Image (cartoon, rainbow, N blue to C red):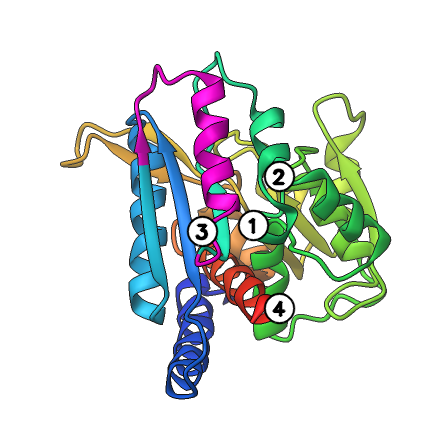
Amino acid sequence: MQILDGKKAAQAIKDELKISVAQRANEGKKIPHLAAILVGNNGASETYVAAKVKACEETGFKSTLVRLEADISEYKLLEAIEELNTDPDVDGILVQLPLPKHISEKKVISTIDPGKDVDGFHPMSVGKMVEGLPTFIAATPYGIMLLLEQYKVETKGKHAVVIGRSNIVGRPMSILLSGNSNPGNCTVTLCHSHTANLKEICLQADIIVAALGIPEFVKADMVKDGAVIIDVGITRVSDPSRKSGFKLKGDVAFEEVSPKSSWITPVPGGVGPMTIAALMKNTYLACETKN
């Protein structure tokens, strides 16, 4: 068993970006600028946005954090997005999800300029990904592909099972792994809550991507020896023995599954850091494309 260390791989990507940004600065070119919109004060969202701002500092990017009240109207939020769309200095825009229930996430995502859609959620970005055209890829699936690439994990001809069909991870992951690329060229089975014989399907998998949000769902008896395990899940589970009062659990029962795997991502420290690294790469690309 070997660890797919997301912290280490993400740091390598950020170090490369830092060099590229410094080179752009020396040549008098524009510095990448990421703008994030945070609505309300959801604790997890605050943590994620803070990590993204920190990553911008580490790589030499400019960053702007737009804080809005939880009761802001949908119209006012869309206005704030349009302001960033028309700001020539802003290269990438992300609106931290989830949003308050009175605001349509679909409408918000569709309002972001596709040329600044570094989260890769805009319908145009998704459509281009399906077509195999150059575009911004959703940060978590892109981060997973970068992680597989960094560790030179063989995917060609392998059977990949993706558990979870969200538009943010599961569906794009199935498309990327089946694409004619490296990593890629897998035969992919996409599973979900209504899949029959899930255990039997997982036992056939050379690669399992678990992205369903149920702590320790994937057990050792669902995994064949030598499988590659990508754990996308991260759930706060109550733990009174810890100062924080909780611990983080993935969708995979790490202790029992890891001895059977050839490669496995830890939680935390696996997919999470790669998501942010992928977002940074998308922002750099947005800047480079325009300037």
Is residue 190 left or right of 255 when viewed as pictured? right
* For marks 3 and 4 on the same chain, the one whose residue lies earlier in the sequence: 3
Residue appearing at x 75%, y 66% in the figure: 155
The local secondary structure at tag 3 comes to helix
- Would you say the residues marked 1 and 2 are in contact, meaning their CB atoms lie under 8 Å apart? yes
Residue hosting label 3: 272
Residue hosting label 1: 140
* For marks 3 and 1 on the same chain, the one whose residue lies earlier in the sequence: 1
Tag of residue 168 = 2
Q: Amino acid at mark 2?
A: Ile
Q: Is residue 254 visible?
A: yes
Residue hosting label 4: 289
* For marks 4 and 2 on the same chain, the one whose residue lies earlier in the sequence: 2
- Spatial CA span between label 3 and label 1: 8 Å
- For disc 2, the neighbor class at 10 Å (few under 14, some 14 to 19, many from 20) is some
Image quadrant assignment for residue 276: bottom left
